[in-house]
Image (cartoon, rainbow, N blue to C red):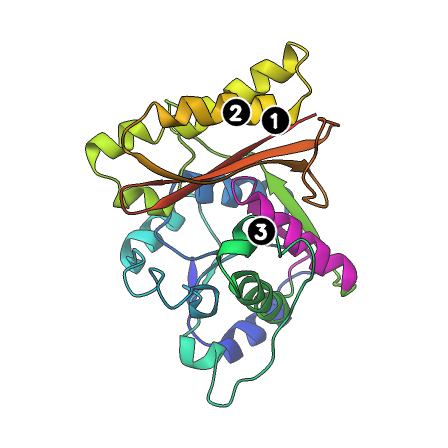
Amino acid sequence: MKVIKTIAAMKRTRLKLPKLVGFVPTMGYLHEGHLELIRRAKAENPWTVASIFVNPRQFGPQEDYTSYPRNIPRDLAMLETVKTDIVFIPPTAEMYPPRYNTWVDIEKVTERLEGSIRPGHFRGVATVCTKLFNIVQPTKAYFGQKDAQQVIVIKRMVTDLNMNLEIIVAPTVREPDGLAMSSRNTYLKPDERQTAVVLYRALKLAQKLWSQGEQDVHRIRQAMTEMIKQEPLAEEITYISIADAKTLEELHKIEPPALVSLAVKIGRPRLIDNIILE
């Protein structure tokens, strides 16, 4: 496994690689979900590149950029176990040098859900992904379904800007009890960790109601809300959304494919999860 720490070195290395390269961008503190993306990238491409970069431009001023979990030696050891070919760890000063002033903005799909409560977040995501795509020049880039809105934003960007790569979306990887794997799960205390499963339970409830013939979005959302509010440690429901899976426009009556997503604050972190009804 080759570790590359400058943009120039990554560009030089890319020139020597074959045309087909799979790419898995991460912010580090890896878990099984990331490794599953690497495995799929390796299965579908002769070379696989993973990046580790905690992008400051997608964090708001009151968010957890400085405390976001970081452990590069641990991450490298994990990437070694799945035989990652190249790991790109660019320094922040190279990604955003002095007088940096260029941004990628995607409209509409960034204005809802996470975008409505994290101003500038998706501008930071789109910008860093554009930079990483330009540096690594992958033919396929791999993302997890857990960050559903991020996937929709990146797909829109790739299409609108005619980028020459394919976005592959892998299913959410979950703990045995259903909790979606996330680096921020490390913030949870033991009792909060038990409570966090309620997100997945609420999503499964929505799926069950829909499979039984319920199409009224209000009734499904109300049932989900009541389930979550039964958990004292679920401090705040930021949103429960049932929306068109491509545009994120809220639905009144379920028309598949519909994205059911939610965000709930439990202890320190605000956790997100989703399923698609189709």
> Within 10 Å of the Cα at label 1, are there few (<14), some (14-19), or many (20+) other Cα atoms?
few
In percent of width and height, residue 244 lies at: 71, 38
Q: Quadrant of the C terminus?
A: top right
Amino acid, disc 1 = His
Q: Is residue 178 visible?
A: no
Amino acid, disc 3 = Gln
Q: Which residues are magenta?
A: 138-160
Q: Is residue 45 above or below residue 213?
A: below
Mark 3 or mark 2, earlier in chain: 3
Let me know if residue 151 is in the magenta part: yes
Amino acid, disc 2 = Gln
Would you name the residue on which mark 2 appears?
Answer: 222
Q: Nearer the viewer, residue 40 or 207?
A: 207
Would you name the residue on which mark 1 appears?
Answer: 218
Quarter of the view holding residue 102: bottom right
Q: Is residue 71 visible?
A: yes
Quarter of the view holding residue 59: bottom left
